[in-house]
Each structure stands twice: as structure tokens, then as C-alpha cells.
Amino acid sequence: MKLLKKLLVTLAFVPALAFANEGGFPLDRAPDRSTDLVALQNGAKLFVNYCLNCHSATSMRYNRLRDIGLTDLQIKENLLFTGEKVGELMKTSLSAKDAKTWFGAVPPDLSVIARAKASGEGSGADWLYTYLRTYYKDESRPTGWNNMLFPNVGMPHALWELQGVRSAKFEEVKDHHDASKTEHKFAGFETIAAGKLSAVEYDNAVGDLVAYLQWMGEPAQNNRKRIGVWALLFMSLLALLAWRLNASYWKEVK
């Protein structure tokens, strides 16, 4: 029930959720790192350093990070910066009033963001992976940033120091259906200022962050899948025994 409430809250604060990709920008496949503890730990570090400043994850406690191989001491020394305790929820210090003043809306809780963004076009991880890699500088926007996947996005580029600053190039091409008309087509990004990471390193970092966001939406997902496999094998064995027992019974009856 609590998870459902968080999902509804996320949907409420992201009104363009169902139409965010209606422009047709293709989703990139996010790397599957759901069982990679090193990647999940790095993703947790990136989340705390770059996302938790504005977004909360109130369905997650810091001590749940034990599930991805971190000890309480490691959590305390590397992920707690403002006096929180290991057993506390992941809350932001940003007040709702300040957030509304600065961004126009309160940033959504990210506890189940990866699940909320799932659609028929791709998984929530694919959406987030593409979204975090398609920011570009746009001085016409209040924040100075825009996004190819989520046009006119209200959120600034939180990871710009890592990725660097880029501009988007567009070109006019003839409409396939009407030669008298032209289309404003995306033609790639152009680097304005380099970031701390190379393009490959940044993509890897985003892959780790997305993996963590996906794991946070359902920390027990790997155990669930593992148990599910054993449950199916057990049921298959029972079905085989029942089939042979049935055959043996009717053989004696005849």
C-alpha cells in the first residue's frame, strides 16, 4: 500500500508522464546492472551526492543499503553528510516552499521513479538512462537547460559538472509527406565545455545511477526472481510426479 501511494504521488507531480516521449525521441537501452553490487554502490553514491539535494526517497532507509553490500560504517562515513542516522529515511533538506519558489513545483519523490516511468516503449530504466544523457544548454529556458526526451523540462541538469555543457544541433529537412513543408530535426549534440568525465565514463556513471534507482524501486526484486525460479522448478517436479502417479494408477485400474 505504501509503495502504491508513492507511485501515485510521483504520477501526480509529473503530469507529462504519459506524454513525455510523444515527440518520438528513441530510448536507449539501459545496461542491466541489477546484480552488480559495485555498480549499485556507485549508483547510491551518485544518488546521495547529486539527487538527494532536491529529491527525497522516503520509501527507502539508509540501512537498507546493506542489501547491496555496504556496512553501517561505510554508509555513515560515505553517504551521511548532515547528521542523519543510518536507520533514517532518505529525505532531502530542501523545503517544499523553497522548491516551489525555485523550480515552480516540488521535485517528485524518487522511491519508485524507475517503475513509474515504465511504458510500452521501454522500461523505466531505459527512460531514465536516456533522459539523464540528453540534456543540453538552452538559454530560452528558465533553468538554462532543456532535454531531448522531455522537452521544456523544469529540472536543471544536476549532472552537468560530470557530463559537461552541450548544445543541441537541429536542421531543417523536407517533410516526407509534403515536400513544401520542412521539419525541425535533431542533428546531434555539440560540446561547449568538457566535463569531469569522458563520454564513456559519464554513460557508465549514469548506468550505475539508473541501476540504483531501479533497485530502490523494489529492493527485493533479485530475491523475488531467484525464489520464483526455484518455485517454478519445484512445481514442475510436482507436476511430473503427479503425471507419473496418475499414469501408474490408471494402469492398475485397467
Image: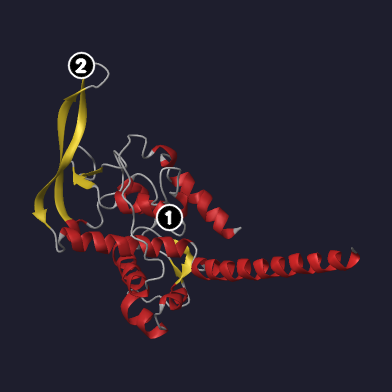
| Above-or-below relation of 181 to 41 | above
Look at the numbered disc 1 and give the secondary structure of its residue: helix
Q: Position of residue 179 (x, y in %)?
A: 20, 16
Q: Could you tell me how far apart the alpha carbons at marks 1 and 2 are, in whole angstroms? A: 41 Å
Q: Which residue is mark 1?
A: 114
Instruction: Please state, as top left, top right, bottom left or bottom right, where the C terminus lies in the image.
Output: bottom right
Which amino acid does the dot numbered 2 rest on? Ala
Q: Which residue is mark 2?
A: 179
179 and 94: which one is in front? Answer: 179
Which amino acid does the dot numbered 1 rest on? Ala
| Above-or-below relation of 14 to 92 | above
Number of residues whose C-alpha sits closer than 10 Å to that of mark 1, classed few (under 14), some (14–19) or many (20 or more): many
| Above-or-below relation of 35 to 21 | below
- In the rendered structure, the answer to whether residue 85 lies left or right of residue 193 reads right
Q: Position of residue 132 (x, y in %)?
A: 28, 53
Which comes sooner in the sequence, label 1 or label 2?
Answer: 1
Number of residues whose C-alpha sits closer than 10 Å to that of mark 2, classed few (under 14), some (14–19) or many (20 or more): few
